[in-house]
Image (cartoon, rainbow, N blue to C red):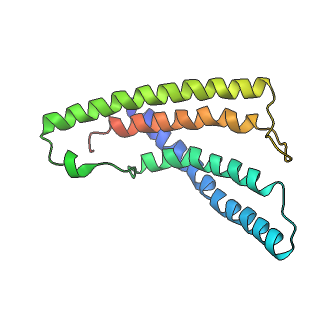
Amino acid sequence: MLKAFFSLIDTITETISKPASLLVFAMMAVTTWEVVGRYAFNHPTIWAWPTNRQLFGLFILVAGSYTMSKREHIRIEIIYDYFPPRLKMIARITTLVVFILFMGVLIWQTAWMGWNSFTSRELLAGAFRVPLYPFKLLIPLGALLLFLQGLAVFSRKDE
């Protein structure tokens, strides 16, 4: 049953990651629009930079989980590979405990931050005052997906 749950997490990560990867092209288009407007027509925008920050934030929320699912995060294998099996197990358990603690605090704090933003209907500071709370509410969801994906990766014995 746990294996099926982690397989579902892998599927969710993969399904969300494909459209999220297209955000890079949206960021490129917004940046191009701003650069051309600013330097070719001397007409900068007030919306390009804040929009790109929000798009990049959404992209990063999913990129961490996707990278985790593909086991592409940087590891220091130069030392780990020479550990005896018992020390490798201790290192994995230590890493898992630290990961759980870190992600637990991250989810808790970002959920609190998102809720406060939602209840105050927080807007982006500056001239381009769009609602900020929808993005802040997505942060704990992205952290939860990363946490579950991390547990799925740690549960596999082939690492």
Q: Determine whether 78 is above or below 38 in the image.
A: above
Q: Quadrant of residue 131?
A: top right
Q: How many marks?
A: 0
Q: Position of residue 154 (x, y in %)?
A: 34, 37
Q: Quadrant of residue 134?
A: top right
Q: Which residue occupies 83% across, 69% down?
A: 37
Q: Quadrant of residue 136?
A: top right
- The residue at the far left in this view is 84
Position of the N terminus by quadrant: top left
Q: Nearer the viewer, residue 45 or 64?
A: 45
Q: Which residue occupies 64% across, 23% down?
A: 112
Position of residue 122 in the picture relative to residue 114 (left or right): right
Q: Position of residue 126 (x, y in %)?
A: 82, 44
Q: Determine whether 24 is above or below 7 in the image.
A: below
Q: Which residue occupies 59% across, 57% down?
A: 21
Q: Position of residue 79 (x, y in %)?
A: 20, 47
Position of residue 51 in the picture relative to residue 2 (left or right): right
Taking the image as drawn, is residue 1 in sight? Answer: no
- The residue at the far bottom in this view is 40
Q: Nearer the viewer, residue 143 or 51?
A: 51
Q: Nearer the viewer, residue 125 or 64?
A: 125
Q: Position of residue 10 (x, y in %)?
A: 47, 43
Q: Which residue occupies 70% across, 24% down?
A: 115
Taking the image as drawn, is residue 41 in sight? Answer: yes
